Image (spheres, rainbow, N blue to C red):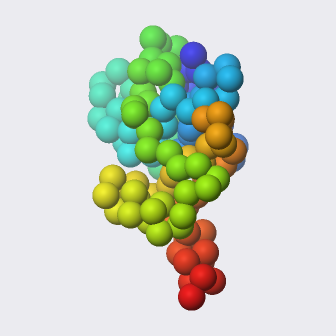
Amino acid sequence: DASLESILQALEQNRRRRAVVIDVDKRVVGIITDGDLVRRSQAASHPGLLARLRGLVTGQPTAVHLPEGTETAVSLMTTPVITITTETPLITALQLMIQHEVKRLPVVDANGRLVGLLGRGSLLRGLLLLE
């Protein structure tokens, strides 16, 4: 139930462009990307969002605070999330990224709990090491 403001704060503090949304059991239920936030930035109800996103991209956070509203992680997130397991072959992960046009895949364990994120750069380095 994280608010838009708390999501932006977390993204700014960690210098990330995405947040994986998990439930109380650490199972992946959604993902919020910078693209999701850019789409929201056009809304009149979020006049400071574009400035905050600019700060996130440039690495220079702004002091614009967003009014508390009804938007939470659940209302902002993309679902369903394409995930891979710790046992997924790298070539399969690459195929999923291409097929679903995503830059990163959440990695889950056998119980569906989040253990990490696999990005394109790491994936490509792993594939090159296999050759």
Is 27 placed above or below 72 here? below
Q: Horizontal and vertical percent for residue 119?
A: 55, 61
Quadrant into which the N terminus falls: top right
Write down the quadrant of residue 99 in the picture. Answer: bottom left
Please state the horizontal and vertical placement of residue 79, each as a whole percent of the image: 40, 32
Q: Position of residue 47 (x, y in %)?
A: 39, 29
Q: Which residue appears at 61% of the width and 75% of the height?
A: 126
Residue in the picture at 54% in, 64% down: 89
Q: How many marks?
A: 0
Q: Left or right: 122 with respect to 43?
A: right
- Residue 66 visible? The answer is no
Q: Nearer the viewer, residue 28 or 56?
A: 28
Residue under the image location 56 percent in, 39 percent down: 19
User: In this picture, is 119 found above or below 41?
Assistant: below
Q: In the rendered image, is residue 20 in sight?
A: yes
| Depth order, front residue of 87/127 | 87
Outermost residue, bottom direction?
Answer: 131
Give the x, y percent position of residue 29.
51, 28
Q: Classify the position of the C terminus by image quarter.
A: bottom right
Q: Is residue 41 left or right of residue 20?
A: left
Task: State the residue at coordinates (40%, 34%).
Answer: 80
Nearest the eye: 65 or 82: 82
Q: Relative to the observer, which residue lies in front, 63 or 80?
A: 80
Q: Quadrant of residue 44?
A: top left
